[in-house]
Image (cartoon, rainbow, N blue to C red):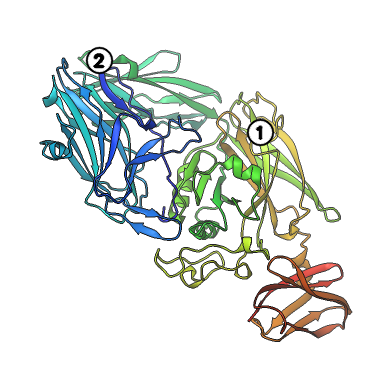
Amino acid sequence: MVKKIMQLFCFSMAATSVFSQVHFYEDFNNGLGQFTSVDSDGDGYEWGISYAGDDFMSQDSVATSASWIYNGTAGVILYPDNWLISDTIDLTGVTGNIELSWMVYAQDQDYAAENYTVYVDTTDSINGLTASTVTFNEVLTPSNGYMFRTLDVSSFAGKKIFIGFRHHNVSDEFRMNLDDVQVKTVEQVDIEMTSITAETHVQTGNSVDITGSLVNRGYDTVTAIQLIWNDGSGDNIDTISGLSVALNQSYNFTHGIQLNVANPTPYNLTVSAYSLGMDDNDSTDNSLAHTVNGLTFIPERKIVIEEGTGTWCGFCPRGAVAMEAMYADNTRPNFIGIAVHNGDPMTVTAYDNGADFDGFPGMNANRKLLNEGVSTQSMQAAYDQLSAETTYLEAEITNTTFNPNDNSFSIDVDVNFATPVTTEHRIGAIIIENKVWGTSSGYNQVNYYDGGSYGPLSGAGISDWTTAGDPVYADQMEYQHVGRALIGGYGGAAGSLTLPATAGSTQSYTVNGSLNGYNRGNCEVVIVVINSTTGEIMNAAKVAPASNYASIEETENTVNLTLYPNPAIDNVQLLVSTGEAGSASTQVINSVGQVVMSNPNQTLVKGDNTLTINVQQLPKGLYFVNVTIDGKTISKKLTVN
């Protein structure tokens, strides 16, 4: 993820589930809340709130402080000394083990080295906090998500305290985010089950390990645990000893008894962990539910990555480059990429609204990984993560018909279910088009990579983005994998699948649509099967319905058109080679779509023909020369100097 384009991407982290007494908690869902920001360096940039949601009360808000910003025209390096100081935290009457905890994250993983210090003292003055002996300091490192941090503040039992978070001694990174600040009394014994990582879909006839992770939230070190899983038929108990899991440390476990997946049905498990020989002071967080679905077969899963982009977005070229790299990657053959445009002539409003990207470039992978950052590496990581997750249905295109007279198509789809499915699922379709270009300035691609300040970039039709100019004008741009239309809406067509579906069953559906308005030879249709409850794309398929009925390409196979010279100053020669005698009409169109020159009914002989256009009177700029032969048009870009 490159810092220079990012809007404030946020990541939701719910508060840690605790039974212990909580003395202070702030999740920043109501602004800075119980904290006050102090801009100690006086540069006008200080702690603020970043939102992933659409409303002020979103649960996805975090406190954020920057060491680099983009001011609309250029990057600005900051040297922050930004304080976030809490209101009074009353610990009078509190005894025992007291812990301060928080979640922290570097917003751009390529620029993660943010430095910060946490101070705790009985005064809220900067001088007093700075002089405190109870502190925590770190330089952030790349991470897969928010990191949980703690500081022992037991020495302040019986007192009133203040917390100071200080972002300082750093420059030219991006942002650090802070969330879920909490002061609590730590119980002596408290095991929290944090995740179950066992497979969710397993072919019948196999057994599966019950795996997961737990955290010791208690003050006492855990030396032995009892693990229990139950699928409704009784407890399966395993004891693991010889451990040494200290406060806030994690432990990854594998239960000694496997689950035998005998039938194509859901196995609904409860998995629990207890500290052996010690009474757990909080039994509310010891268990998690997990479902293992038995499958009659293992479907091959397609990975659909929808990338949010726009010609106005100066860092979006890296998304186009990443998409090109993914399609060329033979080790990831099940990739399907779609460019979802925003704020430019290729925008499909319903698609843009449905994808709901927080920033650009952004991406949704199978609509499960949402608002992810965009780079070749991040697309690869998303593909690999989702490919490792088994799905429970398969989408198969069984037949495609296309009518070249009206550009209508029908695609027959079979959905094969490998396990019983009871919740609503829908079939949708997206028309995508390649080699899209236009004549207006809206097709100019803003390019922040020009000049090389943000590193090298090549691909997506441009050999070197660092020398391509800003913007890259429309005559140099062809946009690929452009989402052009939704069939059935963003969430799919209601009633397209009838539920419940039994394991091993197949349901058929026909998708009907039209390629009118698009270059049919460059169009593909992506079929998606969507879980209506989660919104996730469970599987997909892709077909080019008009692959045998090209339009412009079909004409270009029999007619060769060359412009020379290009760029031109006075006269342009159109070299037209055709297999049959006929007639042609030519038009010159400017960058705003106006016809500035026209010459109809020019005679062509079989073989080579030379047509001349005088452009001496035309203003300098980009034009398009359209040559129409037998009702079919070939368009070439022309620059007049």
- Label 1 element class: strand
Residue 221 appears in view:
no
Distance (Cα) linking label 1 and label 2: 45 Å
Residue 138 appears in view:
yes
- Residue 351 at x, y = what percent? 63, 44
- Which is nearer the eye, 373 or 607? 373
Residue at numbered disc 1: 426
Q: Residue at x 31, y 56 (%)?
A: 172
- Residue 67 at x, y = what percent? 31, 51
Q: Amino acid at mark 1?
A: Arg
Which numbered circle lies on residue 329? none
Please, is residue 575 above or below residue 634 in the view? below
- Label 2 element class: loop
- Which is nearer the eye, 524 or 562? 562
Mark 1 or mark 2: which comes first in sequence?
Answer: 2
Q: Residue at x 46, y 68 (%)?
A: 450
Mark 1 is surrounded, within 10 Å at the Cα level, by few (under 14), some (14 to 19) or many (20 or more) other residues, namely many
Residue at numbered disc 2: 280
| Quarter occupied by residue 421 | top right
Q: Amino acid at mark 2?
A: Asp
